[in-house]
Each structure stands twice: as C-alpha cells, then as structure tokens.
C-alpha cells in the first residue's frame, strides 16, 4: 500500500504521517502549507505542495506515486470562520472532496479514509454520543463534514471503495514539541495564550447543568488519534473494496472546562482564578463520545490521559513562546 495523506503537514496530519511511516506504511503527503508546516514531516516522506482543488496535480500525484489508498485530512476547520464564510468552507471542504474523489475513482484507488468531526452531531443531549445519534450540525463547518460523509459513502457504494469516516472529538497534545498545534482556536492553546500575556484564562459559562457548572468535553491525545488512523487504514487495506466504517475517536471520558483549567494551572504554575464570561452560542453542556464501536470493530482504545495532553501541548507552546515558561 501507498497512502496519500492530504493535509499531512498539518497538526493532525503530521502525526498521522509519522505514525503510519513508523509502522512501515509508504506515505506521500499533499498539502498547500497554508496552515501546515513542511518541517513537521520527517525526512523521506515526499511532500507535494498543492490543493485538492487542483485536479491535474491530483491525477499526477496519484499516478507518479502509485497511490492505493487516501487519508483525507485537508480541510478548513474554524467554526466561527465557517459562519462568516460559508461559501469558502463549502468550496474547500465539499467541492475539494468532490474533486479528490473524482481523481480517486479515475485512478482506481479503492481505500478512502475521511477525517470527519463530532461537529456532525450538533448539540445532542445524551451522556455518551453513539455513532447512531442524530446528525444535526449547527454551523457550516459541521454541515460540510456531514455532507462529506454522505459523499464518501455514496462514492464508495457506487464505485466499490472501502471507506471510513472518523468523527474526532476534542484533539489536544503533541508527540513532540515541534509537532504541537500552532493555532489558538482550541481551549488548551487559548488558555496558554492568556497565560503568556499575563491574563487569567477564560471560561465561557459556569451555569450549565453539570457538576461544576462548566461544559464537559471528551479530549483525545493527537498521538492516540494518529494510532486510530493507522488501525482504520489497515482495516481498509484488508478489504478488496466496498463497505463503510463510521466511528467516533475519543476516550469516552468527560472532563469539565474547570477541571481542565485546574490541570493547566498545575502544569504551568499560573494559578490565577479563571475569569467566567457569558456562554457562547451553540455550546452543548456535555459532549462525550461513546467509543464502544471502535473497540468492538478494531480492538482499539486510547491510552493517554488529559495530563499528558496538557504537558505535551505546554512544551510545544513554550518552544514557540519561550517567555511563557518564566512568567
């Protein structure tokens, strides 16, 4: 097998590329490096610079590298931005996927793994969210991921592709500091950003129907997420074509925002009490994955906890912001 990983120079993509390469899989990365970092990739992994909207580049890449499977991670993923720029998100995430699948079908590739998101569920009111839960996304980002799942499955049925859709919950941490997330869009780097500027972390809403009043989320270490991709890719490689696997990727364990803030304070040494601000629209009180299906199908479970996520993310943050360590 030779796997094309789109978005493979990104935060998640680089971890997936490294995990698959370390396990002996042949990998080639396609990334326009608009948010990815080429230096994240280890020596020996070919990097094709470009976008999935470029059909000629896709055709050439699939042929030149004799690609037999695709892991599609390239996408726009900022929820707020998707609300402001829905046309851009649909073009990048849905039309881009369409162009990629057209190239995949033409090239005779038979394995396709799609990076989806728990955002497809919207805000379900249940203790653990199973894959069978209704999908009712509340923002254009989540809509594009759900539309992507539909498109992947329909293409698989029509053209005998083996497909998988992985619904990520909250991804955090890093395998090594230089691979850490460089964005400030998720809660842990948002905490770090405030700390670096000498300001107390912010909690959005402390009046939810949860034990401490703050939102509860399921956090998954990015290295566990990469391991899950490897497990799913190998399942697809065993199939001649056809069939779909849709699974949650999480720990099945809820952590409240206040609990997370306490872990951050312990690790960073910044102990100022978080500032409580009004709720953000659309935030569910609780969103925790049911992980029974992936355990049953692949005998896979996560192995890293929240403390490992925060410690590794902090090391990565301090590599880029050395002043944070001494505050």
Image (cartoon, grey):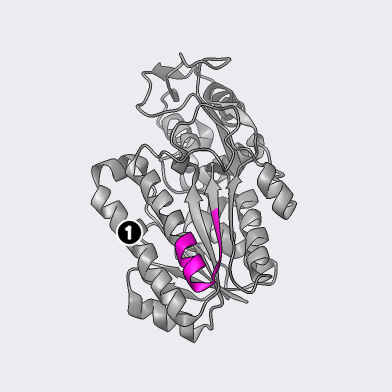
Q: Residue 1: image x %, image y %?
A: 63, 77
Give the residue at x 51% y 26%: 125
Residue sitting nearer the eye, 243 or 17: 243
Image vertical order of residue 206 relative to residue 55, above or below: above
Q: Is residue 184 left or right of residue 252?
A: left
Disc 1 residue crowd, few under 14, some 14–19, many 20+, Cα 10 Å:
some
Q: Position of residue 283 (x, y in %)?
A: 42, 28
Residue at the extreme right = 299
Residue drawn at (38%, 21%) of the image: 279
Q: Report if residue 20 is visible in the image.
A: yes
Residue 197 horizontal side relative to residue 236, left or right: left
Task: Determine the residue located farthest toward the bottom in the rendered image.
Answer: 64
Q: Which residue appears at 40% of the width and 44% of the height?
A: 142
Name the one closer to the observer, 142 or 66. Answer: 142
192 relative position to 78: left or right: right
Whether 164 is among the magenta residues is: yes
How far across and down, in percent of the image, does residue 134 sit? 48, 38
| In front of the other: 97 or 75 | 97
Residue plotted at (54% across, 70% down): 161
Q: Is residue 248 above or below residue 279?
A: below
Nearer to me, 247 or 5: 247
The magenta-colored residue range is 153-165
Where is residue 261, by image quadrant? top right
Identify the residue position indicated by label 1 in the image. 92
Residue 51 appearing in the image = no
217 within the magenta span: no
Hey, which residue is sitting farthest front in the picture?
A: 158
Q: Position of residue 145 (x, y in %)?
A: 42, 50
């Amino acid at each position: 097998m030779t796997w094309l990983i789109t978005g493979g120079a990104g935060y998640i993509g680089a971890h997936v590329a490294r995990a698959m390469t370390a396990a002996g899989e042949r990998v080639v990365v396609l990334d326009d490096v608009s948010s990815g970092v080429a230096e994240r990739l280890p020596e020996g992994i070919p990097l094709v610079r470009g976008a999935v909207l470029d059909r000629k580049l896709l055709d050439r890449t699939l042929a030149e590298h004799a690609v037999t499977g695709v892991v599609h991670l390239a996408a726009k993923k900022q929820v707020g931005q998707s609300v402001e720029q829905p046309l851009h998100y649909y073009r990048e995430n849905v039309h881009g996927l369409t162009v990629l699948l057209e190239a995949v079908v033409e090239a005779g590739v038979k394995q396709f793994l799609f990076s989806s998101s728990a955002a497809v569920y919207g805000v379900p009111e249940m203790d653990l969210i199973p894959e069978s839960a209704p999908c009712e996304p509340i923002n254009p980002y989540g809509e594009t991921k759900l539309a992507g799942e539909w498109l992947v499955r329909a293409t698989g049925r029509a053209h005998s592709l083996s497909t998988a859709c992985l619904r990520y919950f909250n991804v955090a941490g890093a395998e090594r500091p230089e691979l850490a997330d460089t964005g400030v869009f998720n809660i842990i780097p948002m905490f770090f950003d405030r700390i670096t500027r000498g300001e107390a972390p912010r909690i959005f809403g402390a009046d939810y129907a949860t034990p401490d009043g703050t939102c509860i989320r399921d956090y998954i270490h990015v290295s566990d997420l990469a391991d899950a991709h490897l497990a799913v890719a190998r399942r697809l490689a065993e199939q001649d074509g056809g069939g779909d696997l849709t699974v949650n990727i999480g720990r099945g364990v809820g952590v409240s925002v206040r609990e997370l803030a306490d872990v951050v304070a312990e690790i960073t040494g910044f102990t100022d009490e978080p500032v409580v601000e009004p709720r953000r629209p659309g935030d569910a009180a609780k969103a925790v994955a049911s992980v029974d299906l992936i355990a049953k199908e692949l005998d896979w479970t996560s192995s890293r906890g929240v403390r490992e996520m925060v410690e590794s993310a902090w090391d990565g943050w301090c590599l880029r912001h050395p002043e944070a360590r001494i505050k």
